[in-house]
Amino acid sequence: MMEEFLGFERPKGEVGIRNKIAIISSVVCVNKVAQQIANKVENSVAITHPLGCGQFGPDFSYTLRTLVGLGKNPNIYGTVVVGLGCENITSKLIGKQIKRTKKPIEYFDVQDVEGGTKAAIEKGTKLGSKMAENAKELKREPFDYSYLVLGLECGGSDSISGITANPAVGIISDRIVELGGTSILPEFTEWVGTEHLLMERAKNEKVREKIKETINTFLDNTMKIGIDFRGIQPTPGNITGGLTTIEEKSLGTIAKAGKAPIEGIIDYSEKPKGKGLWLMVEPGLDVESMTGLAAAGAQIIIMTTGRGSPCGNPVTPVIKICGNPKTCDWMASNIDIDASKIITADQKVEDVAENLWYKFKRTLDGEQTHAEILGFEDIAIWRCSAAPFQVFNA
Amino acid sequence: MSQKYIVMNSEDNCATSLVDIQEGTEIKHKKSLIKINHEIPLGHKFALSDIKKGDIIRKYGQIIGIATKDISIGDWIHTHNITSHYLEEVVE
């Protein structure tokens, strides 16, 4: 039997598992305007951030690409972009790129609306509400897994994450790849120590070289500012928890990505260029990472946690899986899948993977995750430029 | 009774403890008994076979480091007797 999930078809054939309206602020100055519009529009999410102006170089590109990617994500039915009018990442820049998806899109600047923010909120609410009405007409239909992009994340890891939740997620990632779908492993700082293994899994020589180059560039650049990244892993806390070497720690991390071959490396918030398993360049802060995954088109994210984490994403549902029995008990309202019976009972990693698979499928078909129920909709955009730091410390 | 340890891959020569295992505990592995020579806290590792100084230590079926001294079956494997193979190879 062919495996299918129930999703919403978008104009250019992509498939979402949610059907939300996004209210995006192009710049920090209008965050509250966007938020107040979202408060009034049914089934909408506010996508706000502290950036959008005074940005240059790669930081400019990352912010723009991320905001565009979030609007383009197939979980979003339509988008209203609100700008101020004098920023360098404008509502028009964002809106015009989202428009290529043929999905409903509106964009305007507060400075162009007579009546100030009160009128701007009314205008945004009207535009958003119209989209929300139309979105209701769309019904879920069955689609195969080739339409699905899964994001892999871990945060608040402990010493047992790498032997419980992470390998269980690896089984699901491999399954999605086998079913013709796509999976993305971010957090390249946590690949360090395993690059030789990732290189062995590369689809071809070009990808092999790219993995090597990405890690080496990172290590060289951190060396230039006096940090030997390899010497600070694993951390003292990791060692107390039982980890001994950087490769042991990183192996636990990349266990989330199973055993599938690696198709290539994508930049932060960049859409994968094909199906299968992809690596995404991103430094490892959970919310930045999940924002980048959602902007890259992931319709669903699985996040492993040991010590517990509440984080969610406004665009993409996040399923939490935890192997630590105490955390599963204390933070039960934040954890979707309890992997702790690997520790406390006789469950195998494979048994936990099956529990996760059922939750995963129900989530695709519309069941809410704990982070969704709680309304935890976190956005953070990676800033990679060291320039301001160097200027101010010259 | 709950499992006391997990072996991530059949090629591994170490296991990870899933409880705090007391020194002197006898643990069944495959068809033999392994006597645990040190206290092994949850998340820490012990040797499934004798490992000579300089030998490779495997977890997940992959190299996680090399032994810096002789390790006997049932010994605690931690930073006192394992070092990074990656750092030896790449950095030095």
Image: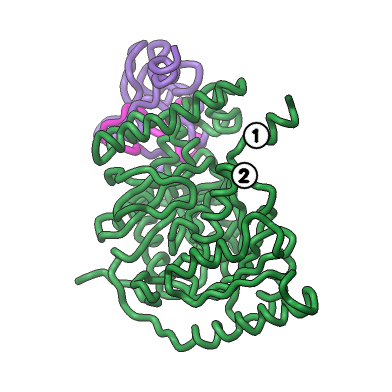
Chain colours: A green, B purple
x 38%, y 60%: residue: A149
Quadrant, the N terminus of chain A: bottom left
Amino acid type shown at disc 1 = Ala
Indicate left or right for B36 with A277 as reference.
right
Quadrant, the C terminus of chain A: top right
Q: Are marks 2 and 1 in contact (CB under 8 Å)?
A: yes
- Residues in magenta, as a range: B7-25
Task: Between label 2 and label 1, give the one nearer the viewer.
Answer: 2
**Residue nearest the observer in this picture, A20 or A190:** A20
Quadrant position of residue A114: bottom right
Subunit that carries the residue with mark 1: A
x 40%, y 46%: residue: A266
For residue A142, say whether it is visible.
Answer: yes
Amino acid type shown at disc 2 = Phe
| Residue B60 falls within the magenta-colored stretch | no
Indicate left or right for A118 with A184 as reference.
right
Within 10 angstroms of label 1, few (less than 14), some, or many (20 or more) residues?
few
**Residue nearest the observer in this picture, A192 or A223:** A223
**Residue nearest the observer in this picture, A77 or A119:** A119
Q: Secondary structure at mark 1?
A: helix
| Residues behind callouts 2 and 1 on a single chain | yes
- Pointer 1: what residue? A387
x 47%, y 33%: residue: A249
